[in-house]
Amino acid sequence: MKLIGIIIILLLHWYIIQKIANQFIKKIKFDIFKLHTILAPINILLTFIFIKFSNLSLKDAGFTIGNLKEGLISIFLIGLPAAVISAFFTSKTAKETFKEISYLLPDSKWKIIYMGILVGPVEETLYRGFLQGNLSTIIHGNLFIFNFSTILASIIFTFIHYLNTVNKAESLKVFLSMIPVRFVAALILGYSFQISRSLIYPIIIHNLIDGFNITALDKAKSR
């Protein structure tokens, strides 16, 4: 029953942010990344409220330094190599793909600010802190090195990106093609949170992956 409630809260979070975003868009036409940057603190505050509402402790949600050694290992031995490899393959993106991912089109300083700095805190607070933190209190056991809560959170993280097709940020074709990549990235982020018990390290990894990827995409687009 709690699992259903968690998913409902995730959808509610998306709905509220969409409604707020629409109010900004009505008043003035924003660069999409400028809009995400403005919404970032609202996004994090809303997640924080949902964490408190779910009776999850801040420590279990990752608001702690956690295991520094494990966190650094996850960054340098897993996260950084994954970011480099991901950027390499991203740089090979075909030009036709850009037409199907609207959020890649704008060229602005806000893209760098959001994708390189803010995307980690926004998404990790929600998907690792709130989602995986809550799942770890109700789902136990593991498969190889991954806790079941890490795997389930990664699956939900992957498929909730379908909402990108709802708001026309990407085509259904792109969403389907990105499922394996997003799932692997989610497992890396989830594993970092699992072994460190802190949001700090998956936030850094998330910023590295998205920052490297957006740089690679910009070079591919200019080419």
Image (cartoon, helix red, strand yellow):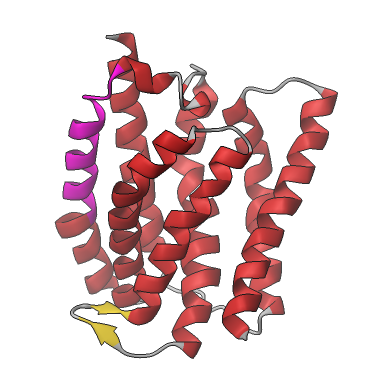
Residue 58 in the image, given as x and y percentages of width and height:
56, 78
Is 103 on the left or on the right of 50, as rendered?
A: left
| Residue occupying image coordinates x 51% and y 75% | 61
* Nearest to the observer: residue 48 or residue 87: 87
| Residue occupying image coordinates x 50% and y 63% | 127
Residue 97 in the image, given as x and y percentages of width and height:
37, 23
91 part of magenta stretch: yes
Q: Residue furthest top?
A: 223
What main secondary structure does the magenta stretch of the protein show? helix
Residue 88 in the image, given as x and y percentages of width and height:
18, 32
Is residue 57 in view?
no
Q: Which residues are magenta?
A: 79-94
**Residue 157 in the image: above or below residue 129:** above
| Residue occupying image coordinates x 23% and y 25% | 91
137 part of magenta stretch: no
Is 102 on the left or on the right of 200, as rendered?
A: right
Is 170 on the left or on the right of 40, as rendered?
A: left
* Nearest to the observer: residue 167 or residue 176: 176
